[in-house]
Image (spheres, helix red, strand yellow):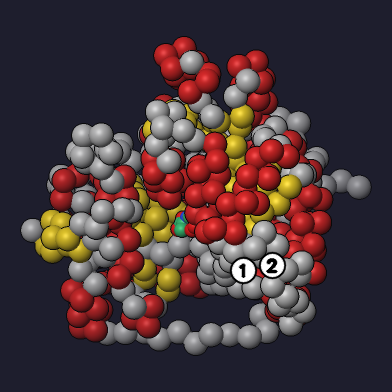
Amino acid sequence: MKKSSVKRSWAEPYKIKMVELLKMSSKEDREKALIAAGYNTFLLRSADVYIDLLTDSGTSAMSDRQWAGMMMGDEAYAGSENYYNLEKVVKKVYGYRYLIPTHQGRGAEHILSKILIKKGDVIPGNMYFTTTRLHQELSGGRFEDIIIDEAHDPESEFPFKGNVDLGKLDQIVSRHGASKIPYVSIATSVNMAGGQPISMENLRNLRQYTAEKGIRVIHDMTRVAENAHFIKVREKGYSGKSIREIIHEICSLTDGATMSAKKDALVNIGGFLAVNERQVFEQARSLVVVYEGLHTYGGLAGRDMEAMAIGIEESVHDDHIQARIGQVEYLGRKLMESGIPIVRPIGGHGIFIDAKKFLPHIDQNNYPAQSLAAEIFLDSGVRSMERGIVSAGRNPDTGKNNKPELELVRLTIPRRVYTQAHMDVVAESVIEVHRNRKRIRGLKMIYEPKYLRFFQARFKPV
Ligand code: PLI
């Protein structure tokens, strides 16, 4: 049969059976809320927010099947059935041999860093993530960025901006020696770069290189399904493969993984560490009881593990991922058509506004992205997040501010939560703020916490 050339739309592969009512606030209310929050969207009360695009973490809508699974919680302290269900799914979908559940992603990062990193070690990675890097540092290691240069350029259209620059990695290995490198830390869908994917080819080359040097590859698989979608649509040889097959192949090129199940895996809480080495597993099983809980629950209730097991299965369906990324692209295209500078290509979990371009009159020391996130909230009650100089924190050796190239505001789309009409409202608000951008002033920081400052720092207009 001849294929029709008329473009057909996709639609969400679900219908809605329960709703949560939203509240719209007045501009006066929002102004008060913003001042009380010290101009930090993390410190707003969610009751003051209209459309919440702070994060895609723990904010997904669960399916009826997941909720039914919650009723099947086996709340035994030891040996819960739900643990075994989760273990089976993790082995089947991702292929890792051993599972340690944790309360969320950073619980897994903590345990893994404590096991593998010694003082003076270096951990190369495809761009830092806040909690991951902090746990590496707290264990005595130092993170080194080996992502390709294109990742630092919001305008580069390179399709795999999450790729590793093997030349940069090789320099680090030559300088420090492989014995100082416990693993290479590889994220799929690189969050801080704008949800940008790594290609299978790059992973394969990395695998070959590290195998020769005897270095592990540890996978931050928080958004692996979204990465798999980009491989499917952008990489030669993958259009006929399912998301499930691609995910399996990605995982097979790595030695272990940390997972925040609060993203891809469609649950409100949960995570895990998964490894292939028996010895690392034994150590993790011993440490998890110190920091999280017994190795068959790791800080989670039985019902949480059941919801996660079902969520993982749902997250690898092609139609789910297509609609999920389709919605992000819908918002991104709307903004691009109106001349809003965003990171391109459009990433997997959100739209990242280039605050340096949006507010060229604000110096990076006056936090353009933080200021822009505050202004968007003020305009419409849409909550976003800073991903720039505040998130980048300070160099642990010099105490000086890290100055990232990327100064971004992230409009993060929760999975299965908002409709296309919500995306229209968000776009209209950003466009309105853009129209009035010259009026926006910068901020100064008046309170800075010691760790992960972006969560709790407070600001005041300059
Ligand atoms: O928030 P956790 O502890 O479940 O996971 C930490 C974490 C690890 N890796 C990556 C790539 C993340 O994106 C991540 C958490 N991200 C958050 C909270 C976010 O808003 O992006």
Quarter where residue 171 is shown: top left
Is 323 situated above or below 187? Answer: below
Checking the image for residue 305, the label placed there is 2
Is 319 situated above or below 275? Answer: below
Q: CA distance from mark 2 to mark 1?
A: 7 Å
Q: Is residue 301 left or right of residue 433?
A: right
Q: Residues within 10 Å of mark 2 (few under 14, many from 20)?
A: many
Q: Position of residue 344 (x, y in %)?
A: 45, 42
Q: Position of residue 125 (x, y in %)?
A: 48, 33
Q: Is residue 15 left or right of residue 384?
A: right
Kindly tell me whether residue 161 is visible in this rendering: no
Q: Residue at x 63, y 20 (%)?
A: 214
Tell whether label 1 touches label 2 (CB within 8 Å). yes
Q: Position of residue 238 (x, y in %)?
A: 75, 36
Q: Secondary structure at mark 2?
A: helix
Q: Secondary structure at mark 1?
A: loop
Q: Position of residue 201 (x, y in %)?
A: 66, 26
Q: Is residue 137 left or right of residue 360?
A: right
Is 307 situated above or below 324? Answer: below
Kindly tell me whether residue 242 is visible in this rendering: yes
Q: Residues within 10 Å of mark 1 (few under 14, many from 20)?
A: many
Quarter where residue 46 is shown: bottom left
Q: Residue at x 45, y 84 (%)?
A: 22
Amino acid type at mark 2:
Met
What residue would you read off at disc 1? Answer: 300
